[in-house]
Amino acid sequence: QVQLVESGGGLVQPGGSLRLTCAASGISGVIFSRNPMGWYRQAPGKQRELVARISSGGSRSYEDSVKGRFTISSDNAKKTVYLQMNSLKREDTAVYYCNWGYDYWGQGTQVTVSS
């Protein structure tokens, strides 16, 4: 059974940084690396949206509002995907979820950007 566990969320002031981590278990590193991985977020009253994605080939894509501020990366040996978030804004406040292979989701981690 594939499990994804996120960590690294919290309260940060505008302009600050956070690094989210998503660790996968229940699969081998080879299988992990063969599927795309993504970070999504859902703010109160809004639909879940894709923030960043990394393909099995290493290609990265980002939602327009986070380009230049967020970076997605992965460590296939550790079966882990990261989201480095810099220059955070209040509108980045949301629950962030990692996704693996489109079908598997973590439980979410809250990111709150507030002074």
Image (cartoon, rainbow, N blue to C red):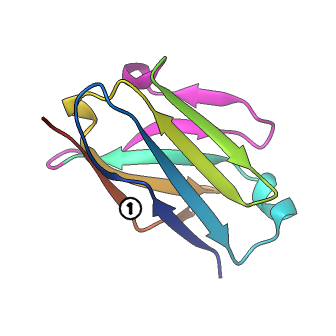
User: SS for tag 1?
Assistant: loop
Reply above or below: 100 against 87. Answer: below
Reply above or below: 54 against 76. Answer: above
Q: Is residue 84 left or right of residue 9?
A: right
Does any portion of residue 106 appear in the rendered image?
Answer: yes
The residue pinned by badge 1 equals 108
Reply above or below: 100 against 11. Answer: below
Q: Is residue 16 left or right of residue 100?
A: left
Please provide percent x and percent y for residue 73.
65, 39
Q: At 24% from the left edge and 41% from the top edge, which residue is drawn?
A: 93
Please provide percent x and percent y for residue 1.
65, 82
Please provide percent x and percent y for residue 77.
82, 58
Please provide percent x and percent y for residue 61.
59, 28
The boundaries of the magenta stretch are 44-67
Q: At 54% from the left edge and 54% from the top edge, which residue is drawn?
A: 21
Q: At 20% from the left edge and 44% from the top edge, which residue is drawn?
A: 46
Q: At 69% from the left edge and 46% from the top edge, which residue is drawn?
A: 74
